[in-house]
Image: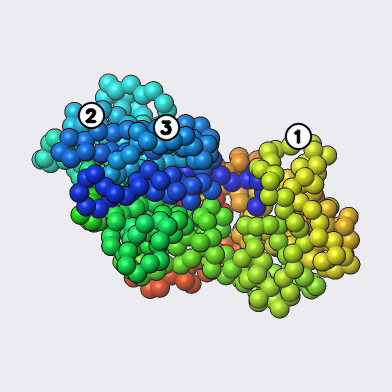
Amino acid sequence: MEDVGLREACGVFGCVAAGPWPTDLDLVHVLTLGLTGLQHRGQESAGIVTSFGQDVYQMAQHKGMGLVGQVFKEENILKPLEGNLGSSEPINCQPFVVETLHGRIATAHNGELVNASRLKQKILHHGTGLTTGSDSELITQLLAHPPPAGEPNGAEWMARIKQLMSYTQIAYSLLIQYKDAIYGIRDPYGNRPLCVGKLQCAIDDADTEDNIDNKGWVISSESCCFQSVGAVYYREVLPGEIVKLTKEGVQSLCIVPRSREVRSSFCIFEYVYFARADSIIEGMLIYVVGQMVYKVRQKCGEQLAREANVDADIVSTVPESATPAALGYSKVSGVPYVEVLCKNRYVGRTFIQPNKRLRQLAVAKKFGALTENFKGLRIVLVDDSIVRGNTMGPIVRLLKKSGAKEVHIRVASPPLKYPCYMGINIPTETELIANKMNCDDLAKHLGADSVVYLTVEGLVEAVQSGIEDLDKNDKGHCTACLTGTYPVELEW
Ligand code: SF4
């Protein structure tokens, strides 16, 4: 995957301590560790809101630009946040906190509302001004609307949340913090991920048998951060489901149906690239484990080898995100996996360079060639996706210059051709290399001997073959950026 390719918009994480207040759980550290585990989903900003007290609740917040470790590094920042529940989200300086008639609420969400402009007009016509232009503010203002006639008024959040979900059906995984509860909400199409974990023990002694009492609950975009906070995977929040986390436990309040009679539309690119490899996704039922992202990526590589095998001496990858796919390719093709590039881990993200020479220099700074591993050999180089095609060309040239006899590129996902309107930053259609050239032209452009992508059918098979009882569980996947078929009609 190129450094300047796709970008996930954000991740959300919330925690509720079990038992009476004050809690002995080091909540702020659980939250910062949880956020750090979701850092791959967004790097621009981070924020934490905590709520604490009994009967009368107060909120404290801190947010800022930068990585989690940069925003929450000072003891004097962490100290005032100490509470008994909190949620946090690392982009656009969420969570968003507003005062309502019934007290303060904080919201944090991952996703993008496809009908945001219509909702914006609705709010403005209602006489409410908007200050940030963010979907979080829209969500918060819609929540502040009185619930529909016939529903109980006042601080009846269920009615308000259901009303919000009737206004907008995709795409969000949302946390709402109010008094002593966190509500976790997943859009009815289930486009963005959200799962619940059980805090079992102190972080340092997560494995000791005498410390397995329930310490509380966490809710997160991904499960990859559970281990570091001392939590175990409990279950996925289902598409359209509203769950409530309190010190007493996790309660499923209801499931809001989809407006169209279609299967759910979980983002298939979470499996390809966004989610961390150790996350568990699409766990069906309580305690029944879903599929680990790493495993699915491996299956994509296996499928790729079935679809697009080529005579070669070694299989390799551009470190590190496509490693499971390369191993899968190697397993099915029988061609040995060998590393060809050494990554300088101290070089951060490389930005778009204006010309070929600067792009080559950026690659040279980031990768060194493990020449003795591949000199005179034919390499299959597996990558998880090609977006603009800016990085792959210099890498192929580096390998060829360092002695590779042939370089065949195999991409473990289909060509990206369409924009995403559900929260993923994809370059414009004209910037996507798959819209500019076919595989043969792309191979020439990159200096490679061949280029082949995984088919859409192959990707769907790799993802869905691991989901038990697919029909019964109504699981479907969004492939819109690959096929142009969106889960809902788009509004312009
Ligand atoms: S369009 Fe692509 S990136 Fe966006 S939600 Fe669908 S599969 Fe994911």
Q: Nearer the viewer, residue 416 or 220?
A: 220
Choose the circle earlier in sequence order: 1 or 3.
3
Q: Which residue is mark 2?
A: 100
Task: Check the image and report above or below for 172 versus 474.
Answer: above
Give the image location of residue 354, x and y in percent: 75, 34
Mark 3: secondary structure: helix
Q: Residue at x 48, y 51 (%)?
A: 37
Distance from Cα at disc 1 to Cα at disc 3: 42 Å
Choose the circle earlier in sequence order: 2 or 1.
2
Task: Check the image and report above or below for 84 versus 129.
Answer: below
- Beta carbon at label 2 within 8 Å of ligand 1: no
Count the marks.
Answer: 3
Choose the circle earlier in sequence order: 3 or 2.
3
Give the image location of residue 130, x and y in percent: 36, 24
Give the image location of residue 35, x and y in percent: 45, 46
Q: Is residue 422 visible?
A: no
Mark 2: secondary structure: strand
- What amino acid is found at the position of numbered circle 1 in the picture? Pro
Q: Which residue is mark 1?
A: 354
- What amino acid is found at the position of numbered circle 3 in the picture? Asn
Q: Which residue is mark 3?
A: 76
Q: Residue at x 18, y 28 (%)?
A: 101
Q: Residue at x 23, y 50 (%)?
A: 246
- What amino acid is found at the position of numbered circle 2 in the picture? Thr
Which quadrant of the figure contains the C terminus?
top left
Q: Residue at x 76, y 51 (%)?
A: 367
Distance from Cα at disc 2 to Cα at disc 1: 48 Å
